[in-house]
Image (cartoon, rainbow, N blue to C red):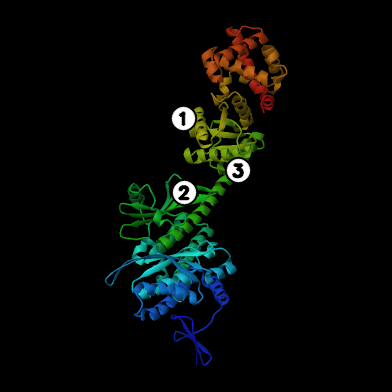
Amino acid sequence: MKTLKLNELLHIRQENELWFANNERSIFVSSQAFGTMQRDLIENIGINRMKTFFFKYGYQLGVEDAKEVAEKDSLSLLEKIEYGPIIHALKGHAKSLITEKDFEVEGNEIKSFRFKGVWENSYEAEQHLQNFGISQSPVCYTLTGYATGYITGVLGVDVFFKELQCQGQGAPCCIWEGRLVSEWKEEAEEFFSYSKELPILKELEQTNVKLMLERNNLSLVSKTYNEMTNELIKGNSIDSILDILHKQHYVPIIVEDGRQNVIACKGITLEDYDSMRENFSELADKKQCHSKVRVFSMENGTRLMSPIFLLGKVVGYCSFLYERERTPNYEIDSMILDRLASICSLLFLKEKTEVESLEQVKGHFLEEIISGKYTQQEIMRKADFIQLDLSDHYHIVVLTYKYLNSCDEKELTLHKKTFERVSAYFREEKNLNVLIGQQPDSLILLMTEKQVRQQNMEKTIRTLVSYLKKKIKNALFLAGISSHYSNILEAGVAMEEARSAVRLSSRDEPITLFSDLGMLGILINDQNEQAIKKMIRDQLGILYESLDKHKLELIETLYHFLEQGGNLDQTAESLVLSKSGLRYRLNKITDLLDCDLRDPQRQFQLMMALKALKIIEHERIKKIQA
């Protein structure tokens, strides 16, 4: 038997080719082998579990060494503490040095304990750097575990050691600190978290239970969703779908549109719902939110609510209502409600497609009426298919639109938006059956007088324009209204009247009736267009020749001046000009026309010429202004 005595603390001997340290059988393990285990543990169980594993391993090593030292009665308590770093170093873990000590004992009670020190050449940090590079946090878990276990074993009270800096983070050495657990306060939670970690098999078992529960939940949700989808495929209504859901879920269900008007309900009457919805709190319970489903508190229960999306916009809401004594299963219920919202989105899309198809058919029908394709009998018969009586007096309205200034949206987008809004306005807001035709820069509307008898046609179109201005920002809407006609075969003539009228509409007066054109409306037609142009040339002279933007500016000034009855203040306000700027323009116009702008007869002739110019030369003026 051979004994190798390194010092008074660590005795190494060999017996029967086996090695013993302080009478405990020992094995030699290279730091590289430890590094391999460190890498494999991180890759297989993750860094957090690896921390727990190594901390507990080091803690046990420290506790075993503390037993040997604790039995030496010749050593004082402080000496026993100081032997810890020495044994640590002798075992090759790191070169350890105590730099600060604060230790106070009263009787058998440890009053305070605070030690600081340094580890140099930590084998654990060395291997981490080789295998993973620089870490964002300390990595010497076995070393802190050893120090914690050793001092806890010596003192008989709980202590905790942690690294303040680490070689694994790129520091020149590791700096550690140890205190009583009670002195660490919140930071001691780190210590307790190591002890509270579940064994991986137990955690896997719990995870499996959760996965089974989740699978069952998903199976239930999937079954419900499939049954609702089958009802949708069969072409059944929202009521049929809610019947299916209510039989399985036994909870009141509400489906509303974007303005929160009830579309369908099941398990609750409209009267009960109206009294209940007044008690909804304004704010959703953030803690209970799942996905886009929101939870609202009520005095007598709870409401789960999910938006219905269509083409990226909210078009309605689905809700489950719960009485106070019933607690929602938020996990399952929110998923089912979300699926119901998806089904409603498809229903709304189907309805939207049907409406758009009908509107396109009606628009095509109007184009054929205007083109003179059908006889009166054919028109009346086809109109019956869309529940429209065209034997009544009617008006044609031309609605034009454009952006007021540069806008990122394309004109095609404005065209689509305007058509959708006009169609929705008459269908949903006014419940009127209107034929709407589309042209590149305008909409053509055919409206029967019988449908708007409670308010005249002008008021109806004026409210439409106001509605469009609110719904579509940064756009100008102008309308022209034809005379009333009784013969549907004259729709083409009525459209030309409306088109002539809209050319005199402006931002200040966006609605113009053909009747407002007076004699001018009667005179302007294809047969006497050249005579009208001669009249314009005679009255406007040089202003009409070689039209350009500068002359159009003067023409617009003259038009507003005459329209305001020669009132300078009102004209300046209408043109957004200073009075001096207005006077300058009027003087220039007077010089060019060589006439007195205050002469009533001359004013009448000029106004007729200007209105005729806006109608006859409309396309030419648009090109100049573009």
| Three-letter code, disc 1 | Gln
As helix, strand or loop, the secondary structure at mark 2 comes to: strand
| Three-letter code, disc 3 | Gln
User: Are the two marked residues, 2 and 1, in contact with CB atoms closer than 8 angstroms?
Assistant: no
User: Are the two marked residues, 2 and 3, in contact with CB atoms closer than 8 angstroms?
Assistant: no
Q: Is residue 17 above or below residue 170?
A: below
Say which label, 2 or 3, has the lower sequence index.
Answer: 2
Q: Which residue is mark 1?
A: 455
Q: Which residue is mark 2?
A: 316
Say which label, 2 or 1, has the lower sequence index.
Answer: 2
Q: Where residue 428 is drawn, which disc sits there?
A: none
* 329 left or right of 560 in image: left
Q: Would residue 274 be seen by someone viewing this image from the given angle?
A: yes
Residue 115: x and y in percent read 40, 66
| Three-letter code, disc 2 | Gly
Residue 394 vs residue 341, the one in the foreground: 341
Q: Where residue 360 is drawn, which disc sits there?
A: 3
Report how many numbered discs are placed on residues in the image.
3
